[in-house]
Image (cartoon, rainbow, N blue to C red):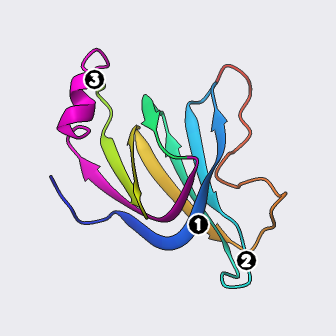
Amino acid sequence: MNNMPIFSSDRLFEVWQYTVSHRQLLMRSNKSYSAPTRLEVLFKDVAFMAVPPVMKGMSITNCTTADEELLLNLAALPSSKPWYRLEADGAVGYIAAGTIVTNEDELGYEEASPLLAVLPFGS
């Protein structure tokens, strides 16, 4: 297992949106007094997710499978997607997804993510 983070931030992240039709999970860290930008992480083609709704600090690493104990409980869930381990202050989560995309911008709390392009239904 490669323990080098593919993404790491000490900011507060929230599960912001899950789009069923495109199987996309958006995690967001909104602007604050200490962070002048909004930071987002989008997981595309999600096959499995078990993440806390709020994560203080987040580090994402590749892993071949979820931890052994979790994997034993999920043996009936085969996935050809890459597995990702998310670690935060006191929490661990796992996601099996096709890819990860990140974005940092100066948009506000209510503004839509540029990572979630509006696609026609059925595409």
The residue identified by callout 1 is 12
Q: Residue furthest right?
A: 110
Identify which amino acid the numbered label 1 is placed on: Leu
Q: Residue at x 73, y 22 (%)?
A: 121
Q: Which residues are magenta?
A: 53-78
Q: Secondary structure at mark 3?
A: helix
Mark closest to the chain's N terminus, 3 or 1: 1
**Looking at the image, is mark 1 or mark 2 earlier in the sequence?**
1
Place residue 87 in its image quadrant: bottom left
Task: Give percent across and percent down for residue 54.
Answer: 58, 54
Whether pointer 1 and pointer 2 mark residues with C-beta atoms closer than 8 Å, the reply is: yes
Farthest bottom residue?
34
Q: Residue at x 50, y 54 (%)?
A: 101
Residue 90 position, x and y percent, is 41, 59
* Disc 3/disc 1 C-alpha distance (Å): 29 Å
Q: Residue at x 68, y 76 (%)?
A: 37
**Disc 2/disc 3 C-alpha distance (Å):** 39 Å
Q: Nearer the viewer, residue 97 or 109?
A: 109
Q: Which element carries disc 1, helix, strand or loop?
A: strand
Extreme residue in the front direction: 90
How many marks do you count on the picture? 3
Q: Which residue is mark 2?
A: 32
Graded by Cα atoms within 10 Å as few (under 14), some (14 to 19) or many (20 or more), the crowding at tag 1 reads: some
**Horizontal side of residue 60 vs 51, given as left or right:** left
Q: Quadrant of residue 110?
A: bottom right
Identify the residue under disc 3.
73
Q: Amino acid at mark 2?
A: Ser
- Mark 2: few/some/many CA within 10 Å (<14, 14-19, 20+): few
> Quick one: quadrant of the C terminus?
top right
Residue type for callout 3: Asn
